[in-house]
Image: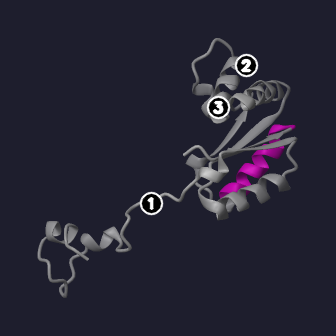
Amino acid sequence: MSAVMTAMFDDWGAAERVLVDLFRDGFPTDRVDLTSDGEPGRAGLAPAGSAHDRFVRHFRAIFPLQDELPLAERFAEQIEHGGAAVTVHPRGALETMRAHVILARGRPLALVEHDLANQSLEHAASLRETPWIRHFLLESHHPADCIYCRLFERE
């Protein structure tokens, strides 16, 4: 999913407070990221010759459109001068709204959104409304007598 929001803050402390607020609001840790010079996060995993190049590659992956390419350089420079970025991958309109409110409350230097119009909700477990755990719990009143019959029954 390419829907993403990144807020640039003037210091690490402000970014960390926003990150904690996002976690408290219920955003999972795998969809929120903090990038700073001291804690590069996912940007530290990018193969590059220098820290600056790692940050540029990281932000180019987040903002891949031609008109967004200058953002990568600008964000990398701000991080090298003590700034920090918080990136959120929201799912759906409600999470987008909540993320925007929390990021804006932290008074970022910049708040950039990418591809928010093309996001969709993901089905984390199943397309069915029936919980998967039901297939593993043995109930005496269920007509199927084996787990395979339960998994492949028609609803």
Query: Relative to residue 57, is residue 139 drawn left or right?
Result: left
Q: Which mark is residue 123?
A: 1
How many numbered discs sit on the rendered protein? 3
Mark nearer the N terminus (3 vs 2):
2
Amino acid type, mark 3: Pro
Q: How is the image coloured?
A: one colour
Read off the residue under disc 2.
52
Label 1: state its secondary structure. loop
Q: Find the distance from the CA under tag 3 to the CA under tag 2.
A: 17 Å
Q: Find the distance from the CA under tag 2 to the CA under tag 1.
A: 37 Å
Of residue 150 and residue 38, the one placed in the foreground of this image is: 150
Question: What residue is drawn where x is 77% and y is 51%?
Answer: 18
Extent of the magenta region: 10-23
Question: What residue is drawn where x is 19% and y is 72%?
Answer: 153
- Disc 1 crowd rating (10 Å Cα; few below 14, some 14-19, many 20+) is few
Read off the residue under disc 3.
64
